[in-house]
Amino acid sequence: MNLYCAVDVQDGRAVRLVRGDFDERRDFGDPLALVRRYASQGARWLHVVDLDAARTGQARNRDVVLEIAREARELEMQVQCSGGVRSRDDAAQLIAGGAHRVVVGTAAQKDPALLRELCDTFPSRVGVGVDHRARGAQVALSGWTESSGVSVEEALARLEDLPVAAVVVTCIERDGTLEGPDLEGLRRVLGATPHAVIASGGVRSTQDLASLRELSAAGRRLEGAIVGMALVQGLLEVREAISACEASG
């Protein structure tokens, strides 16, 4: 299981939200400094989110995100970019700028034709974000400010015949809380989609990562786990988190 170190950007700053609440924001300074810190600790993947673009569709932090992607490439890390990917041009710019993968959230639900076009145009480079509340009953859009009106299961069913590189599943009620991941919800997701699944939300400890690593359904396991608050607050070090993700037995 891969570890994805989260770098969320708002107003050009590295921040963390709690339960997706933009009014409950914690500021952690220069995002490039955070990237370098993670690189020095052995990070291999970054999960970078433009929070402003996720909410409004306007890529206010695009220059910062592209600078992160360039820096990460020089530091031999791969980057997964999310937030505000609403067009082919958005995806093309991020991939050309160094992103290994882009994650489409709002547009995946509102514009299925665009999602199919992106998957065809950028093979193995497009993931889909499925952010949910109420135990998967409501998939959220636009930076968690709107409801799509569909459940996680319905959203996953729509992806079944698409060549999606990965599905990034975030339990919003646990995101930024350090209360532990939604294991039962993730088990249902593993059983409901053929695509690789990356879990997000709630990780606090190496034990949480071990639980995610061992989670299985229909003979499948998680491809990765995104960790944000625990890393940025220093509750976990990147090296020990990677070890927890990769341990066997």
Image: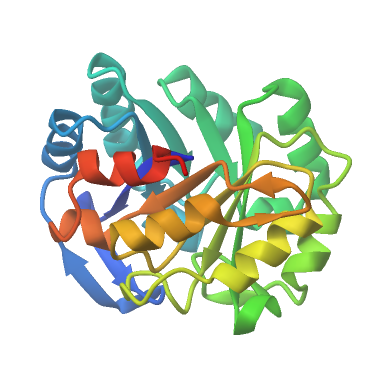
Residue 105: x %, y % from top left: 61, 54
Residue 173: x %, y % from top left: 47, 79
Say whether residue 110 is visible. Answer: no
Image-based side of 39 in relation to 180, left or right: left
Total numbered labels: 0
Residue 60: x %, y % from top left: 35, 48
How is the model colour-coded? rainbow
The furthest residue to the front: 249
The residue located at (48%, 18%) in the rendering is: 96
In terms of depth relative to the viewer, which is nearer, 57 or 163? 163
Say whether residue 228 is visible. Answer: yes
In terms of depth relative to the viewer, which is nearer, 120 or 181? 181
On the image, which quarter does residue 148 sit in? bottom right
In terms of depth relative to the viewer, which is nearer, 119 or 157? 157
The residue located at (40%, 77%) in the rendering is: 19
Image-based side of 160 in relation to 84, left or right: right
Above/below status of 211 relative to 163: below
On the image, which quarter does residue 37 sit in? top left
Image-based side of 179 in relation to 103, left or right: left
Residue 180: x %, y % from top left: 39, 72
In terms of depth relative to the viewer, which is nearer, 13 or 133? 133
The furthest residue to the bottom: 134
The residue located at (56%, 41%) in the rendering is: 223
Above/below status of 138 relative to 205: below
The residue located at (31%, 72%) in the rendering is: 178
Above/below status of 197 relative to 235: above
Above/below status of 130 relative to 226: below
On the image, which quarter does residue 119 sit in? top right
